[in-house]
Image (cartoon, rainbow, N blue to C red):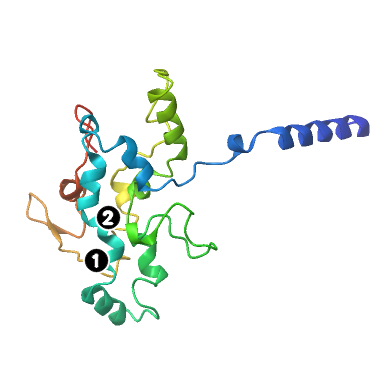
Amino acid sequence: MDGRLMIAVMFLLSVVCTSVPAYAVEGPEYVGHSQCKICHNKKEEGEIWNVWSTKKHAKAYEMLGSPEAKEVAEKKGLGKPPQEAPECLRCHVTAYNPEKDPPLPAKIAMKDGVQCETCHGPASLHVKDGQAFKMKKDTSVDMSAHMTRADENVCRRCHNEESPTWNPERYTREDGTKTGFDYEQAWKKIEHSIPGKEKK
């Protein structure tokens, strides 16, 4: 390639790369459960936020302060109390990452435990979709486009053999076999669906 042509190409690439708006190259951000509550606490939405707030996921951080959690942490030889130990927080708090400083996104609070975005992904783009759909009445918006569909693989990121409270016989399947995690039975414990839509 001719030297002048190469310089011209490099210049054009630098212009394109620096002129692309930040929102076009950045991924979605965490917004926190109170943002989810705005839409997902209505009857027509299945009052999903209310359901979440009464289940164990919402109390996941709180559970780390229990005597049982402290006993598990001691047995496992963790150097910190469960509510401070990265080994526990990575699954008991949404978006916790000990390798970042700070380890939590700005809009996520530890005390709120396992929020919506743990299973459904950071929701800033979904919120923008919702604003366009509800406020601007843009019916072309696909409300599922920027949401992770929570499935068994999502659950197993935390509900697996690495969990200090893993019990390989926690669930009994219909055929009588034991397993540490059964997606169908676990889903029933936290079930929350929009009425009229496919569950899970």
Which quadrant holds residue 180? bottom left
Instruction: Tell me if 152 is positioned left or right of 174 in this view.
Output: right
Which quadrant holds residue 59? bottom left
Tag 1: amino acid:
Trp
Q: Position of residue 4 (x, y in %)?
A: 92, 31
Q: Earlier in the sequence, mark 1 or mark 2?
A: 2
- The disc placed on residue 102 is none
What residue does disc 2 label?
58
Q: Quadrant of the N terminus?
A: top right
Q: Residue at x 22, y 36 (%)?
A: 193
Along the line of sight, which residue is nearer the eye, 184 or 140? 140
What residue does disc 1 label?
166
Q: Position of residue 54 (x, y in %)?
A: 20, 52
Along the line of sight, which residue is nearer the eye, 93 or 200? 93
Q: Position of residue 5 (x, y in %)?
A: 88, 29
SS category of the residue bearing label 2: helix
Q: Quadrant of the C terminus?
A: top left
Label 1, label 2: how far apart the Cα atoms are: 20 Å
| Mark 1 residue crowding within 10 angstroms, few (<14) / some (14–19) / many (20+) | some
Q: Position of residue 37 (x, y in %)?
A: 31, 41
Along the line of sight, which residue is nearer the eye, 186 or 31? 31
Tag 2: amino acid:
Ala
